[in-house]
């Protein structure tokens, strides 16, 4: 197992979940400050990169900050050390801390910001609120000795292969014979160098979302007994799962809006929200979008949502939603913090199996609003 990571390796693994190509063109994701070649021991996950967060990172000897909101979202024309932004950049460079941002790509990614928000509310039958494309599909065919077929099939299925609708572990198998001749320098699982082997094998075929392909291949190779795994990949024309910003889903049971507002506060661990609409109205279908989503009220209404959850709602836009019969719950922009523990869990699972990394969530308060 790896005992020393560098930033580039961690980011490569992270981007298997939240690839940069998912981000909108106007966004600034990826490396913000620092070096991709820096060795990493301590990682901090945060929503924002404010000065108090950087001070916390310095105190805790953090090597890499992974943030949701980009530090350099607006182009800098100068680095003035007398400004808050300039002081932040100075401290980061002085203490050799690298900053990486995953913004709209983490909003859109499966299991990202909007899915975490939906998970906390128990939303079912989800789809994107604003569709931006489909996840491409690939056909994977792998050849396995018969007595190891179950192990390989289970490994690739658990890694994300073989999902069709609400069915998992979907594969097709054929029996046949494989041939190979180990040459010099090999260490074959079956057979001897220089001798032709004929082995009873299973041909396993399955479908894989392209976004999960790297993880599926890694799981396949780990479970497969052969030194060199024989497999094929075929691009498919089948439409994959829709990708996009926000989510629309249904609650397990209809609930009165007033009670649902309480559920939102509890789920997102926030003391209060701003809300509009008929509080006696029953709600079943929920649209949500982490961050600032007021410009999508019409999309929320077209989706059939009874209520729309998003931050930074303004007065007149909320009036428009009210006149359309769309209830609105504004939990604030900072509610996106709910994704930070998920990022930590992902890094623990995929980068820290041997415990050589210390991964923590920032404890600094970056919420600018206080209810008084």
Image (tube, rainbow, N blue to C red):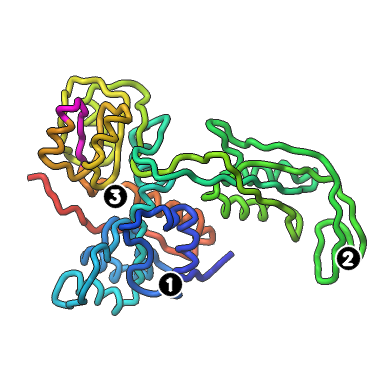
Write the start and end of the magenta stretch as one range.
322-331
Label 2 CA crowd tier, 10 Å (few <14, some 14–19, many 20+): some
In which image quadrant can residue 347 be found?
A: bottom left
Does residue 309 sit above or below 100 in this rendering?
above
Which quarter of the image is occupied by the C terminus? top left
How far from the left and from the top, in percent, is residue 227? 75, 60
Q: Counting residues from the N terminus, which is met first, the one under dot 1 or under dot 2?
A: 1
Give the numbered dot on residue 193: 2
Which residue is rendered at x = 66% and y = 47% of the image? Answer: 140
The extreme bottom residue here reads: 94
Reply yes or no: does residue 247 show up in magenta: no
Residue found at the very far front of the displayed protein: 237
Read off the residue under disc 3: 337
Decide: is 134 above or below 31: above
For marks 1 and 3, the one nearer the N-term is 1
| Residue of label 1 | 36
The residue lying toward the viewer, choosing from 77 and 117, is 77
Which type of secondary structure does the marked residue at label 1 adopt? loop
Label 2 sits on a secondary structure element that is loop
User: Mark number for residue 179?
Assistant: none
């Amino acid at each position: 197992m790896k005992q020393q990571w560098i930033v580039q390796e961690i980011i490569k693994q992270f981007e298997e979940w939240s690839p940069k190509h998912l981000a909108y063109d106007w966004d600034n994701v990826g490396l913000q400050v620092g070096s991709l070649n820096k060795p990493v021991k301590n990682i901090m996950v945060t929503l924002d990169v404010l000065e108090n967060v950087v001070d916390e990172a310095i105190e805790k000897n953090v090597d890499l900050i992974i943030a949701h909101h980009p530090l350099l979202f607006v182009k800098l024309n100068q680095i003035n050390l007398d400004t808050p932004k300039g002081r932040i950049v100075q401290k980061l460079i002085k203490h050799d801390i690298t900053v990486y941002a995953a913004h709209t790509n983490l909003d859109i990614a499966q299991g990202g910001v909007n899915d975490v928000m939906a998970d906390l509310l128990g939303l079912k039958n989800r789809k994107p609120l604003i569709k931006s494309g489909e996840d491409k599909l690939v056909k994977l065919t792998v050849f396995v000795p018969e007595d190891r077929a179950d192990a390989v099939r289970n490994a690739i299925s658990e890694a994300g292969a073989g999902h069709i609708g609400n069915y998992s572990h979907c594969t097709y198998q054929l029996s046949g014979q494989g041939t190979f001749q180990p040459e010099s320098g090999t260490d074959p699982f079956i057979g001897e160098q220089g001798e032709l082997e004929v082995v009873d094998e299973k041909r396993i075929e399955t479908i894989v979302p392209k976004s999960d392909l790297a993880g599926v291949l890694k799981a396949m190779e780990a479970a497969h007994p052969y030194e060199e795994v024989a497999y094929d990949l075929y691009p498919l024309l089948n439409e994959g799962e829709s990708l996009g910003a926000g989510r629309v889903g249904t609650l397990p049971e209809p609930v009165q809006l007033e009670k649902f507002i309480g559920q939102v506060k509890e789920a997102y661990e926030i003391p209060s929200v701003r809300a509009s609409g008929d509080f006696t109205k029953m709600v079943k279908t929920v649209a949500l979008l982490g961050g600032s989503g007021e410009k999508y009220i019409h999309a929320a209404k077209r989706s059939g949502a009874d209520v729309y959850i998003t931050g930074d709602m303004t007065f007149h836009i909320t009036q428009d939603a009210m006149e359309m019969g769309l209830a609105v719950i504004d939990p604030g922009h900072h509610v996106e913090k709910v994704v930070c523990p998920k990022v930590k869990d992902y890094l623990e699972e995929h980068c820290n199996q041997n415990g050589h990394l210390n991964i923590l969530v920032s404890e600094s308060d970056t919420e600018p609003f206080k209810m008084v």
